[in-house]
């Protein structure tokens, strides 16, 4: 049973403030991923295991996302690692899935650390192979 459906935004999210603060252009895949629809987190499965795909419910969620990306970017700068933008939390403790802002690759990483490994060459390819997890009726 689906309790909600993603809803297309009336206007795409504006990442210009984040881009200005970081002095970098945000990868177009990230802008499309977070900026096109409103939705709720989605529980999904991939060959690598389970995950919760991050989605934005409203403008307040977008503001929190931007704040979290800024903090994540500062941690990356401290360790001189490439900028990544997180898209999902994994079932593996603190590990998360992120998009490398320069290349668009999906990578597995720990918060504040360098990428551990590439998971997919692109966000589109990664999303295409995900399978929804059926909600249990309790």
Image (spheres, rainbow, N blue to C red):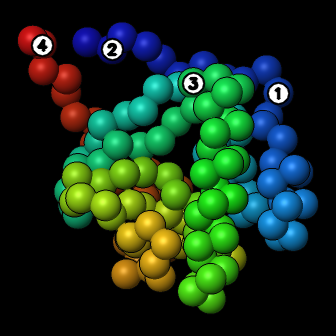
**Front residue of 45 and 67:** 67
Viewer-nearest of discs 4 and 2: 4
Asked which secondary structure carries label 3, the reply is loop
List x then y, in percent, for residue 19.
84, 60
Which residue is the site of mark 1? Answer: 11
| Residue drawn where x is 31% and y is 61% of the image | 94
Asked which secondary structure carries label 1, the reply is loop
List x then y, in percent, for residue 133.
22, 34
Which of disc 3 and disc 4 is earlier in sequence?
A: 3
The quadrant where residue 43 appears: top left
Which of disc 3 and disc 2 is earlier in sequence?
A: 2
Does residue 48 appear left or right of residue 64 in this picture?
left
Which residue is the site of mark 2? Answer: 2
Which of disc 1 and disc 4 is earlier in sequence?
A: 1
Asked which secondary structure carries label 2, the reply is loop
Asked which secondary structure carries label 4, the reply is loop
What is the CA distance from the residue labelled 2 to the residue labelled 3? 16 Å
List x then y, in percent, for residue 97.
42, 61
Q: Are marks 1 and 2 in contact (CB under 8 Å)?
A: no
List x then y, in percent, for residue 67.
67, 48
| Quadrant showing the N terminus | top left
Which residue is the site of mark 3? Answer: 57
Categorize mark 2 by other alpha carbons within 10 Å: few (<14), some (14-19), many (20+): few
Q: Is residue 30 above or below residue 60?
A: below
The tag on residue 137 is 4
Q: Is residue 6 visible in this depiction of the protein?
A: yes
């Amino acid at each position: 049973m689906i309790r909600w459906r993603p809803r297309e935004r009336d206007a795409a999210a504006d990442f210009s403030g984040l881009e200005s603060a970081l002095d970098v252009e945000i990868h177009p895949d990230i802008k499309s991923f977070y900026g096109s629809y409103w939705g709720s987190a989605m529980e999904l499965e991939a060959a690598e295991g389970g995950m919760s795909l991050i989605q934005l419910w409203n403008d307040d969620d977008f503001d929190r996302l931007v704040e979290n990306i800024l903090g994540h970017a500062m941690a990356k700068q401290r360790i001189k690692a490439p900028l990544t933008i997180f898209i999902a939390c994994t079932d593996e403790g603190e590990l998360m899935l992120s998009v490398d802002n320069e290349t668009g690759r999906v990578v597995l990483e720990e918060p504040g650390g360098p990428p551990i490994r590439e998971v997919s060459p692109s966000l589109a390819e990664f999303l295409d192979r995900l399978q929804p997890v059926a909600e249990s009726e309790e």
